[in-house]
Amino acid sequence: MKTILSSDSMDIPDGVKVKVKAKAIEGNDIELVSRSCALINQRCHVKNKDIRKFLDGIYVSEKGAIAVEEN
């Protein structure tokens, strides 16, 4: 994921935060976050290779609201 997101050709919309080390994509607008996830997923597809050898991928681990810490 680091290699994919470090390239300059990724157009992540304003209002969407991508945390590479935490492997998280956050934002207030569900459509922008979904679009960003779809773009990243499309970039991860293996092309012109035997896909049985590539077991790595990006998956949705959980969905939900992000808890806000109160000080």
Image (tube, rainbow, N blue to C red):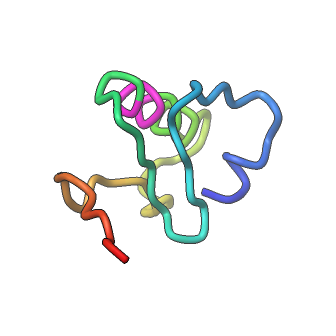
Q: How many marks do you count on the picture?
A: 0
Residue 20's image quarter? bottom right
Which segment is the magenta one?
33-38
Image quarter in which the N terminus is found? bottom right
Residue 5 inside the magenta-drawn segment:
no
Residue 31, given in percent of the width and then of the height, sits at 32, 22
Residue 65 vertical position relative to residue 41 in the rendered view, above or below: below
For the stretch drawn in magenta, the main secondary structure is helix
Residue 3 figure quarter = bottom right
Identify the residue at image location x=58%, y=35%: 43
Q: Is residue 36 magenta?
A: yes
Q: Residue at x 32, y 71 (%)?
A: 69
Question: What x and y, as percent, mark residue 65?
Answer: 20, 52
**Residue 67 image point, x, y percent:** 25, 64
On screen, 55 above or below 45?
Answer: below
Name the residue located 45 percent from the left edge and 38 percent from the top edge: 41
Give the residue furthest to the right: 8
Q: Residue lying furthest front in this view? A: 71
Residue 44 is situated, as x and y percent measured from the top left of the image, at 54, 43
Q: Nearer the viewer, residue 7 or 69?
A: 69
Quarter the C terminus occupies: bottom left
64 or 67: nearer the eye? 67
Residue 65 sits above or below residue 34 on the image: below
Locate residue 58 relative to residue 44 in the image: left or right. Answer: left
